[in-house]
Image: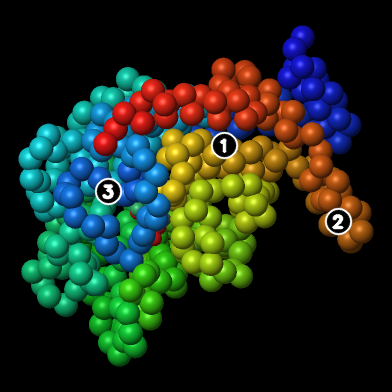
Amino acid sequence: MGNIEKSYELARERYASLGIDTEAAIKKLADIHISLHCWQADDVAGFESEGDLTGGIQATGNYPGKARNIEELRADILKALSLIPGTHRLNLHEIYGDFKGEKVDRDEVDFSHFESWVEWAMANGLKLDFNSTSFSHPKSGDLTLANPDEEIRGFWIEHTRRCRAIADEIGRRQGSPCVMNLWIHDGSKDITVNRMLYRSLLKDSLDKIFETKYEHMLDSLESKVFGIGLESYTVGSNDFYTAYCTQKQKLITLDTGHFHPTESIADKVSSMLLFVPALMLHVSRPVRWDSDHVTIINDETLDLAKEIVRCDALDRVNIGLDYFDGSINRIGAYVIGTRATQKCLLQALLEPIETLRGYEAAGKGFERLALLEEAKSMPWGAVWDEFCRRNGVAVGESYIAEINAYEKEVLSKRN
Ligand code: RNT
Ligand code: ZN
């Protein structure tokens, strides 16, 4: 028996003494398929145009070796996946279509531009999710689906309708519902005196977009506090989408960077799941603003993972990632963030929740707090290592060397 297995055996016994079955936790973790965001590979550039990233989001850093085309992006994602235990999903934005060098405007896109993605995904055991793209386009401006200009609003309605049809066809072909996230940047920089108008326009646009019912895709709507250059007003606020999704029974996307810094995203899970069918997560790491730093194990991510498990809601929460750091090796960024999210979920799955709930029900506040504290230093790391070993991926920090080798052999030859 190797050291990893020996450590795991000891950990398994330690957890068993608290009534926790580590084998069951490992099984559940293997069933969680995280949706990796394709846009970490190239700083949200996509394959549509050479234009700047707009829409109030920003990728900072210019670490060499970013993916410049569809082949490089696919290769980078497969490299990242080879260092992440389990089977996962890939979340595509519309601007990552396989346009084959042709100019395809956003109101012209259709499934043919994603056919090769589906084939590639199936060949590599991946399922796809999807996003309409409102930013980085001459018609983006400050307002898209909430634009009083009927020509521009119509353009974005058509785009979003087409994206839903694409998502449905992806879902049909892959035999697993494709979650389509809808995030628009619509808002304004300064004091806005016609807030009701833009929100009623957005509501009307969404009603039109959702007129078609689909079987193989799920709509999820993402709110935000503010974007860069759009600080004073966001049309698609949290209240707006919470109300809209509740009424229309759509999914809500919770991006962990899209709330006020002291708000707990974890605490939203139980409230929202009582009123909407499911949630989508964009697990991220905001540093002072929606900076989209690489996800790590921190209190926010841990709390969120624990809350999902405590709510017994793993089957109603689609876990995706959303960050874009251009200042470090981008494949490394995928691996760190995905593994960190999985590690948080594993800690959540290993929580002695029955005992904790017993204490709570009996009013034993000291005992509850003590066990929560002790649980933090339980040997979950040994269970994680065993999970990696069983999945045939790098254990511990050994992925650093593999990523450095890929950088030397592949990334450094780009540019
Ligand atoms: C922006 C939103 C949105 C984007 C992606 C690229 O603040 O988080 O989800 O990051 O769609
Ligand atoms: Zn997001």
Q: CA distance from mark 2 to mark 1?
A: 27 Å
Circle 1 Cα neighbour tier, 10 Å, few/some/many (<14 / 14–19 / ≥20)? many
Q: Can residue 277 be seen in the rendering of this structure? A: no
Residue placed under numbered mark 2 in the picture: 369
Residue placed under numbered mark 1 in the picture: 339
What's the residue at 36%, 40% (across, down)? 64
Using the image as rendered, state which of residue 91 and residue 53 is in the foreground.
53
Question: Which residue of the protein is positioned furthest toward the top in this rendering?
Answer: 1
Q: Is residue 225 above or below residue 12?
A: below
Quadrant in the picture for the N terminus: top right
Mark 2 beta carbon near ligand 2 (under 8 Å) = no
Tell me if label 3 and label 1 are in contact, CB under 8 Å. Answer: no
Q: Is residue 44 above or below residue 378?
A: below
Question: Residue 99 at what x, y percent from top left?
Answer: 14, 38
Residue placed under numbered mark 3 in the picture: 45
Q: CA distance from mark 3 to mark 1?
A: 24 Å
Which of disc 1 and disc 3 is earlier in sequence?
3
Q: Is residue 74 above or below residue 244?
A: above
Task: Name which residue type carries label 2.
Answer: Leu
Question: Residue 131 at what x, y percent from top left?
Answer: 30, 49
The local secondary structure at tag 1 comes to: helix
Which image quadrant is residue 96 in? top left
Task: Kindly report which numbered mark, 3 or 1, lies closer to the viewer in this rendering.
Answer: 3
Using the image as rendered, state which of residue 12 and residue 210 is in the foreground.
12
